[in-house]
C-alpha cells in the first residue's frame, strides 16, 4: 500500500520535538552496518501476520504504547511472568494484549541474521510503525538503539492511562513522560484501530451518575446500540465494540465520530472538554493529512522515552 509522501516525517524534524530526557543514543541508522536487513525482516513478518489476523495491527500498536508508559520503551511488556514475579503482560490493563507471537517470530528470524544485535524494544517500536503504515496510516523513521529492560512488574501497569480518565488525569499522566497535550490528542487517534471489551466503557452506558443512566454526551442511538451489545449484567466474555467504524483501517474516522458523540471511552470524550484539545480534534476530523503528520511526530517522541534498558535479549520473553 503506497504511503503519501507528505506523511513521511524526517528524523531531523522529529528530533527537534524531543524532550530533554530523550535517549541521545537513538538514531535512524543504528543497525545500518550491524544488521542492515532488520527493518525489512520486521515488515515482512508483520505483513504476513496481518494477512492471517486483522487484529494484529491494533495489538502491536497498543503493545508498544503500554510498553513505553511503564519504565519507558524497554520491551518489559514482552517478558513472561515467572514463579516469583507477575510480569506487566499479566497486569489488569494488559490482560487483553495479544500477538506476542509476532514479536517472537521476528526475533527468531533476526537472531538468525544478526545474533545478539537487535533489541526486543526496537523490534516492538518498528513493528508498531509497520502495523500503522500497512493499515493505511503514515510511516516515519523510527530512532533505534533501545536496550531491553530486566524488570517487569504487573503492579506497575497502573501507570497506564485508564479509559475512564478525565482530561486533567490524562494530561498529568502524559506530562510525566514528557508528552504534551498535543501529543495526547494525536496519540489518542491510535484508537482508530481495534476493539474494546464492554468493561472499558461500561461506566458510560449504565448508571453514569445520579441523574443519568447514560452519559448525556453520547449520541442517543449509539448509546442504545452499546447497551444492546453490553447489557448491565453482561455474561458474554468477549462482548464489546470496535473503536471506530473502520476498525482495520488507520484513518481519521475516530475524530469524526468523537465530534458526533460516538466515542467509546470517557477518556476520548474528555478531549472535547478543553479549548485547545477540542480544536485539535476538529482539525484532525477535517484533515487526515494533518492527523497523520501529528501522529507520526508524537509516535517518534513517545517511542523515545528512556527505558534504561541494559541488554539485548536473545528471547523477548526472558532476560539473559
Image (cartoon, rainbow, N blue to C red):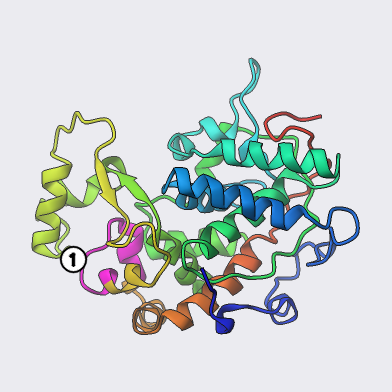
Q: Which residue is at the far top?
A: 83
Tell me where residue 252 appears, x and y as whole percent: 38, 72
Residue 42 can be seen, yes or no? yes
Identify which residue is drawn at 15% across, 32% down: 233
Tell me where residue 47 appears, x and y as whole percent: 55, 52
Q: Is residue 154 left or right of residue 216?
A: right
The answer to whether 92 is drawn above or below residue 267 in the figure is: above
Q: Quadrant of residue 276?
A: bottom left
Secondary element type, mark 1 = loop
Tell me where the magenta segment starts and ends, as one range. 257-271
Q: Is residue 63 left or right of residue 192?
A: right
- Front residue of 165/75: it is 75
Q: Is residue 54 left or right of residue 90?
A: left
Tell me where residue 261 appears, x and y as whole percent: 21, 68
Residue at which label 1 appears: 217
User: Could you classify mark 1 by the number of other residues whose Cα lies within 10 Å: few (under 14), some (14-19), or many (20 or more)?
Assistant: some
Identify which residue is drawn at 69% across, 49% down: 123
Q: Quadrant of residue 275?
A: bottom left
Identify which residue is drawn at 50% across, 72% down: 181
- Front residue of 168/319: it is 319
Residue 312 can be seen, yes or no? no
The answer to whether 46 is drawn above or below residue 83 in the figure is: below
Tell me where residue 99 appears, x and y as whole percent: 52, 39
Identify which residue is drawn at 61% across, 39% down: 77
Q: Is residue 286 left or right of residue 128?
A: left
- Front residue of 315/182: it is 315
The number of numbered discs placed on residues in the rendered structure image is 1
Judged by its main secondary structure, the magenta piece is helix
The answer to whether 155 is drawn above or below residue 126 in the figure is: above
Magenta residue check for 259: yes
Q: Quadrant of the C terminus?
A: top right
Amino acid at each position: 500500500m503506497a504511503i503519501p509522501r507528505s506523511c513521511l516525517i524526517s528524523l531531523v524534524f522529529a528530533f527537534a520535538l524531543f524532550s530533554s530526557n530523550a535517549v541521545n543514543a537513538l538514531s535512524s541508522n543504528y543497525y545500518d552496518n550491524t544488521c542492515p536487513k532488520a527493518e525489512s525482516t520486521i515488515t515482512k513478518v508483520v505483513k504476513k501476520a496481518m494477512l492471517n489476523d486483522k487484529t494484529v495491527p491494533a495489538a502491536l500498536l497498543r503493545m508498544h504504547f503500554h510498553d513505553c508508559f511503564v519504565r519507558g520503551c524497554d520491551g518489559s511488556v514482552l517478558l513472561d511472568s515467572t514463579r516469583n514475579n507477575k510480569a506487566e503482560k499479566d497486569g489488569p490493563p494488559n490482560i487483553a494484549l495479544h500477538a506476542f507471537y509476532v514479536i517472537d517470530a521476528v526475533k527468531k528470524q533476526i537472531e538468525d541474521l544478526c545474533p545478539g544485535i537487535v533489541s526486543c524494544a526496537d523490534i516492538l517500536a518498528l513493528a508498531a510503525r509497520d502495523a500503522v503504515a500497512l493499515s493505511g496510516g503514515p510511516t516515519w523513521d523510527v530512532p533505534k538503539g533501545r536496550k531491553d529492560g530486566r524488570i517487569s512488574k504487573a503492579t506497575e501497569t497502573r501507570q497506564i492511562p485508564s479509559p475512564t480518565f478525565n482530561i486533567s488525569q490524562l494530561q498529568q499522566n502524559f506530562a510525566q513522560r514528557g508528552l504534551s497535550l498535543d501529543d495526547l490528542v494525536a496519540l489518542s487517534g491510535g484508537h482508530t484501530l481495534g476493539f474494546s471489551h464492554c468493561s472499558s466503557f461500561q461506566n458510560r452506558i449504565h448508571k453514569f451518575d445520579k441523574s443519568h443512566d447514560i452519559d448525556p454526551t453520547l449520541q442517543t442511538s449509539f448509546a442504545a446500540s452499546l447497551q444492546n451489545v453490553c447489557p448491565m449484567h453482561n455474561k458474554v466474555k468477549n462482548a464489546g465494540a470496535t473503536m471506530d467504524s473502520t476498525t482495520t483501517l488507520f484513518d481519521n474516522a475516530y475524530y469524526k465520530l468523537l465530534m458526533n458523540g460516538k466515542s467509546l471511552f470517557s477518556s476520548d470524550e474528555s478531549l472535547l472538554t478543553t479549548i485547545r484539545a477540542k480544536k485539535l480534534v476538529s482539525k484532525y476530523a477535517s484533515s487526515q493529512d494533518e492527523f497523520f503528520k501529528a501522529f507520526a511526530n508524537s509516535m517518534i517522541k513517545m517511542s523515545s522515552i528512556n527505558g534504561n534498558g541494559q541488554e539485548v535479549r536473545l528471547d523477548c520473553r526472558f532476560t539473559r
